[in-house]
Amino acid sequence: MEHRLDHRVIESIVAPGSRVLDLGCGRGDLLFLLSREKNARVQGIELDAKAVQDCVKKGLSVFHSDIESGLSEYPDRSFDYVILNQSMQEVKNVDYLLQEALRVGEKVVVGFPNFAHLRARIMLALGGRAPITQALPHRWHDTPNVRFLSIRDFEEFCRSKGFRILKAFPLGADRIVASWPNLFAHNAIFVLAK
């Protein structure tokens, strides 16, 4: 089975045998990969009931809940990694959620679409319409995204909040982008710590 680039990158980040919490885990593909390939002890939280059922069919431990309500039921440092892959931009109170993720996890892995990608800029500038790209597949009226951010925006946000960026992986369609990531990366993955 061919895995998505962002999942392969996150797999390379997570140490074997780690405790992992995936916030907005979807159908559990990443959790399943980490469980199988890294022998990680995985848990997820997902709002979509059908996606939770898909996770359970894979033998995963996933709670049906809204990540925006916080992680108060988890003690400090319950996990080695807390993952928000393609879910942070769908959250209204990003600051609160990241603070909570950094409280319950040693490290937080955040993945999001780069809204400043060249193709998105061209579609907006020349077409005069909200961009639809591989990383941004939804129309403006049916997108789950409530945040529209660039790689540079996220770096500045982390600095302003005192979050340490341990690693950053700007991703193109099929590889890590070597230069001008804010312009050429479709997505980005950051590893954060307090």
Image: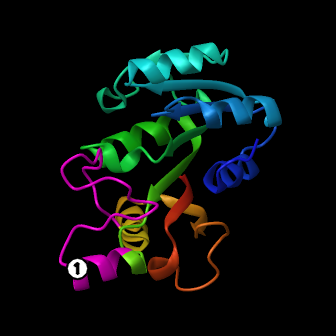
- The residue carrying mark 1 is 127
Q: Residue at x 65, y 26 (%)?
A: 42
182 or 128, which lies in front? 128
Number of numbered discs on residues: 1
Q: Residue at x 44, y 26 (%)?
A: 46
Is residue 8 visible in the rendered image? The answer is yes
Please tell me whether mark 1 sits on a helix, a strand or a loop: helix
Magenta part, dominant SS: loop
157 or 119, which lies in front? 119
Q: How is the image coloured?
A: rainbow
Q: What stretch of residues is rendered in magenta? A: 120-149
Lateral position of residue 62 relative to residue 68, left or right = right
Quadrant that contains the N terminus: top right
Lateral position of residue 59 relative to residue 112, left or right = right
Lateral position of residue 170 relative to residue 42, left or right = left
Q: Position of residue 164 (x, y in %)?
A: 52, 61
Q: Position of residue 160 (x, y in %)?
A: 34, 65
Is 139 contained in the magenta span?
Answer: yes
Residue most extreme to the front: 127
Lateral position of residue 189 relative to residue 9, left or right = left
Q: Vertical placement of 40 versus 94: above or below?
A: above
Q: Residue at x 56, y 37 (%)?
A: 105
Q: Residue at x 72, y 35 (%)?
A: 34
Under mark 1, the amino acid is: Gly
119 or 15, which lies in front? 119
Is 49 contained in the magenta span?
Answer: no
Q: Vertical placement of 177 versus 42: above or below?
A: below
Q: Position of residue 55 (x, y in %)?
A: 57, 20
Q: Position of residue 66 (x, y in %)?
A: 34, 25
- Residue 49: name its quadrant: top left
Q: Vertical placement of 97 versus 174: above or below?
A: above
Is residue 194 visible in the rendered image? The answer is no
